[in-house]
Image (tube, rainbow, N blue to C red):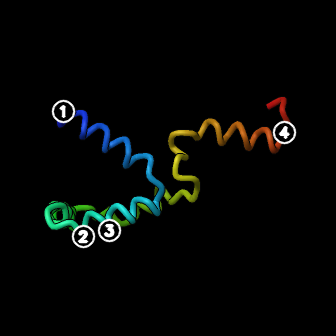
Amino acid sequence: MTAAYDYEDMHHLVDRLTPTQVRRLRLLVTQDEELSQVAQMLHEAQSPEAEAVPEGLLALIGSIDGPADLGERHDDYIRERMRERFGDSA
């Protein structure tokens, strides 16, 4: 396997993990001597100041409470709600 294939393979694997599995993977990474150093450097690089959202922006965009794949499957969810509300003709 090439490094590029390994990277893509791991990237797709992590994308398919459930939130519980992601927490478990993070625990495994933090317990590994070599990987924990990389994770620590990443955590330090992403300081809260760098991710600060301008005040009022969250009020403008609000928050969405929905399934994790809402962005990818929003059309399906809308169709499903239309069917529930108006029947199969929607």
- Label 2 residue SS: helix
Cα separation, mark 2 vs mark 1, equals 26 Å
Amino acid type, callout 1: Thr
Residue annotated with mark 4: 86
Cα separation, mark 3 vs mark 4, equals 46 Å
- Check if mark 1's residue and mark 4's residue have beta carbons within 8 Å: no
- Residue drawn at (76%, 39%), measured in percent from left and top? 82
Which numbered dot is residue 27? Answer: 3
Residue annotated with mark 2: 31
Is residue 46 rendered to the left or right of residue 23?
A: left
For the N terminus, give its image quadrant: top left
- Check if mark 1's residue and mark 3's residue have beta carbons within 8 Å: no
N-terminal of the two: label 1 or label 3? Answer: 1
Amino acid type, callout 3: Leu
Viewer-proximal residue among 81 and 8: 8
- Residue drawn at (29%, 37%), measured in percent from left and top? 8
Amino acid type, callout 2: Gln
